[in-house]
Structures are given as structure tokens and as C-alpha cells.
Amino acid sequence: MGRGDQDCPGGPQLPVLGQPTRERADAARNRRVLLTAARAIMTECGVADVTMDRVAARAGVGVGTVYRRFGDRSGLGYALLDDAERRFQASFLSGPPPLGPGAPPADRIRAFLHAYVDRLESQADLHAIAEFHAPTARYSAPYQVHRAHLEGLLTQARPIGRTTDESYLADVLLAALGAGLFTHQRRDRHFGTDRIKNGLDRLLDDLIQADAGNCR
């Protein structure tokens, strides 16, 4: 959303779920209020309209409060990604099935892919900007969590006796969820999210069925 890695040396460091937070209760509450306001503006108007002034007005605080909390617009953008990542990780690690535990592994993978598409539908610009200003952001800590999650589920879904490279396959599935590709598909090729999800379903089905077929 701005100067990128000039404001965040080394690029954005998004969290792995479970890392400790050190905010005071009042600071955490203020942060939630400001992020809620920023998310509402982004949903209603798009990323370009998420400015420090508009967030302050929406939250009912002075603009200085927003600058003190996030530093600048880049800091606000990374905070939005950070907050969304924490909620996303909580949903697939401990939320209700089929995204969370309790469903068959193939169903959980499908739910993960669909949830990621829904997330990109509202946040693709933020992800694309972060990846542009800090290319390593695409493969930062959250990516490692996503890959490990998919790798584990792919291993569980693998037919007995079949040997596959689940780590590579997890990368393949995540490559199809890149913000740049998603934006190209939605804006340049006019794909709807249903078409993208159906394509991911087919990719996943082909992977799993190929494993089953080779095991006969």
C-alpha cells in the first residue's frame, strides 16, 4: 500500500499462529477498532480508498491516532494482512469442519482452497502490493504454515502404498492461489470465483484420482 520494504525492512513479517502478542489490552482494543474500520472501507470501496484519514473518520478518532498505531499506510496494509492471516489460520487449524479438523482430508483441502479464493476476492490487491514491494513475502512464515497444512492433508489422503511428493504438490496448489494470477483471472480474463473454485476442484480431484489409479 505504499513504500513496502522501505517501511518494513526485509519485507512484511506476517505471523505464525500462536506467536505471543505483547499489546496492552487497551492498545489491542484500539487496534481492533481501527482494523475493523479499515476492513469495512476496503470491502465497500476497495484498497485504494483505505487511507489514514478515512480510517480515522470511520473509527471516530483523530488521524494522529492511526499514524501512531501503524506508522503509515504501508504499516496499515501489513496490519490488515497480519490480522486476516491470524483469523485464517485459526479457521483451518482449529475451526469447524470441513475447513477445520473433523472432515476427510480431501474435503479439508477443498475447503482450504475455496476459503483462500474467498479471501483473495476481498484482499487480492493487498497481497499483490505486498508481493510487489517485498517479493519474499509470498513465501514468508504464513506460506510455510499453509504448505505444511496442505502437505499433511495430502499425505493423509494418499492411498496406502503410493509414494508421492506431497511437499511439491502443496506448492503446486498454492501457486494456483497467487495474488497476481488471481487478479489476472478475475480482471483480465473475467473468471468468476465459482469458475476458479471449480478449476481448483478439478486439479485436486485429478491429483487424488491419479494417485488412486496408479495404486491399482
Image (cartoon, rainbow, N blue to C red):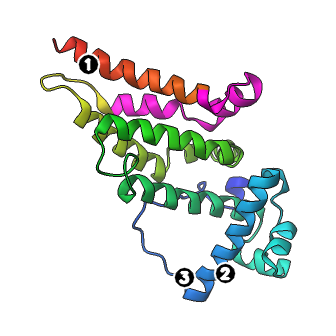
User: Is 69 rendered above or below residue 42?
Assistant: below
Residue range of the region highlighted in magenta in the rendering: 167-194
> Going from the N terminus, do you reach mark 3 or mark 2 first?
3
| Mark 3 vs mark 2: in front | 2
Q: Of discs 1 and 3, which sits in the foreground?
A: 1
Q: Split into 4 quadrants, where in the image is the C terminus?
A: top left
* Residue at far left of view: 161
How many marks the image carries: the answer is 3
What amino acid does circle 2 point to? Asn
Please tell me whether residue 57 belongs to the stretch shown in magenta.
no
Residue highlighted by disc 2: 30
Residue at (50, 49) in percent of width and height: 140
Q: Nearer the viewer, residue 44 or 135?
A: 44
Does residue 2 show up? Answer: no
The residue carrying mark 3 is 23
Residue at 59% x, 46% y is 119
Counting residues from the start of the chain, the first of labels 1 and 3 encountered is 3
Q: CA distance from mark 1 to mark 3?
A: 47 Å
